[in-house]
Each structure stands twice: as C-alpha cells, then as structure tokens.
Amino acid sequence: MNGESEPAIEDNIFRQLKEKFSDAELRRMANGSMIRPEVDTVKHDFDGDEICIGLVSDTHLGSKYTDPDMLFQAFDVFTDEGVDMIAHCGDVHEGLSHRPGHMYECTHLGYSEQLEHSREVFGQWIDTDIYMIDGNHDRWYIKSNGALIVEELCKGQDNLNFIGHDEGDILINGITIKLWHGEDGSSYAYSYRVQKLVEAFTGGEKPNVLLCGHTHKAFEMFCRHVHCVSAGAIQRQSKWMRSKKHESHTGFYVVRIGINETGVSWFEPRFYPFYR
Ligand SMILES: [Fe+2]
C-alpha cells in the first residue's frame, strides 16, 4: 500500500476517467457498455437534386488479403466521377481476434500498427468528406481493451467522420442514408439478410437508402421502398472466408441519387469489380 486511503484512490481513479472520457461515455460505461446504444445522425451539407456517393466497405486494413492500392484505385475513380462524399460501411481495419493463426494473416499487427497504417492510407484522400462506421473486426479492439479504433482514426481529421458503432445515419437534403454493418453471418441467398433487416425497421424508422457492409457481397435491391446496396469489399477473398465457402465480391460502388420533395426520385448504383 502507498498510504493512500480508499476514498483517495477512488477519487484518483475517477479523476483519471473524467480526464479521458466524456460524461456521456461515462454514463454508458456505468450502464455496462462502451457501445453507444442510440443510432447517431450526422448532417451532410448539400442542397442539390443529385448527389454522387463513393461507396466502399470492408477494407480490412492490416490484412494480407487487402491491397491498399485497390482502395487507391477506388479513390481515383471517385475523383473521375466527381463524388460529393464517400461512405465506408465498416471493418475499416482487420483487427486482431483470438482465432488460431489470425496473426499470421496480418501485415500490421495490433491496434497501434493498424491505426498508423489506416492514418497513412486515408491521409492520402483529404478533399472529400468520408463517413465511417465501425464493423465487428474494428470492434475486436473494444472487446479486448476498450479501444475505439475507427473513432480514433477520425479524430482531428477534418474530412473523416466517425458516425457510429455498427450503424449510423447521414441526413442529406431531406433524405436519410443509413450505413450498417452487423455481426450476423451471410445468408444462403445474398439478399435475404438485407431484406430481413429492412422488415425489422419499425414505423417511421426506415431510411431512404441503406448501405450495407460485413458480408463482402455486392448487390442492389429495393425493399419496402428502401433502396439497398450491399457494398462488396475492398479485401480480396481470404483463406477464412474460403474455408467457410463464402464468396467474396471484391470491388466498390459509385452511387448516384436523385433527390426531390418526395425523397429519392431515382437511384443508380454502379459496381466496379476487381476480378481477383
Ligand atoms: Fe468484413
């Protein structure tokens, strides 16, 4: 013992926590969770009638199955297409699980190396707003040591916006675009998982557009008046996904959306596949 009384030790610990976390974060911890229970909504300043969105997901930076050059190729297309903003549907980083052998599938090992790597990669795209959520791979760091790697990546970067754990909403000139990742698995039919999610929205909760990550599948569907795109992945097919017999759709989207007083007037997603 260093001679400090128990109340003094508690005061000291609480002071350190107060320095590190906001009141809202402390309240969430007191409720037993580091995860925000509510869906965050951010507003993207835009007042036109046609918006162009660059869409990527599952970059898994730090994985040996991810070639950052493929993300840079997406950035080049986004430049050519003149996108107004970029959306990333989670699994920004590979993370580090307790699965045997996972560490041998990483080019960058652990929180610090992967964060440094993602800062370097996203630091090369500074002209356009990028909205990100985290995915289950990013959240392995929350589960193991409480670290919020995607939030940390976005801190202090003007164009990088962390908009939520697992899901987040972007409000654009009257329409809502929801980014979603999920912790569930692939469904036998690609579209079934997304269809069930849309069916699970309660009245008044449906977004106009739903952009999904996690399964590494690329498709578009229209369900209950929601325009849905499953974003594919920047990560190539991995040994783990092949062992589970999961197909990987490697590529990215450019999504053009017409906006009028009724919401979405037309919807045009275009997939750019990588055939490797
Ligand atoms: Fe993923």
Image: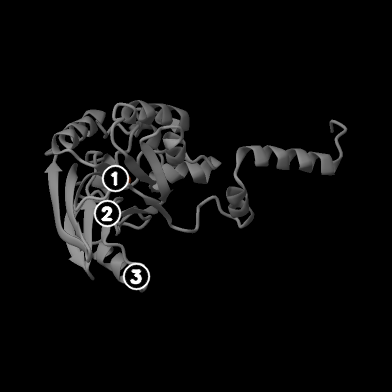
**Is 111 on the left-hand or right-hand side of 241?**
right
Please state which amino acid type lies under the numbered disc 2.
Leu
Residue at left offset 27%, top offset 58%: 210
> Circle 1 is placed at which residue position?
87
- In the picture, the quarter occupied by the N terminus is top right
Quarter of the figure with residue 206:
bottom left
Q: Does any portion of residue 93 appear in the rendered image? A: no
Q: Position of residue 190 (x, y in %)?
A: 20, 59
The image's mark for residue 211 is 2
Q: At which x and y percent is residue 248?
A: 20, 46
Q: Residue at x 14, y 34 (%)?
A: 80
Q: Which residue is mark 3?
A: 200
The three-letter amino acid code for the residue at tag 3 is Ala
Q: CA distance from mark 3 to mark 2?
A: 16 Å
Residue 239 against residue 196 in the figure, above or below: above
Disc 1 residue crowd, few under 14, some 14–19, many 20+, Cα 10 Å: many
Q: Tag 1 or tag 2, which sits nearer the N-term?
A: 1
Viewer-side residue, 215 vs 8: 8
Which quadrant is the C terminus positioned in? top left
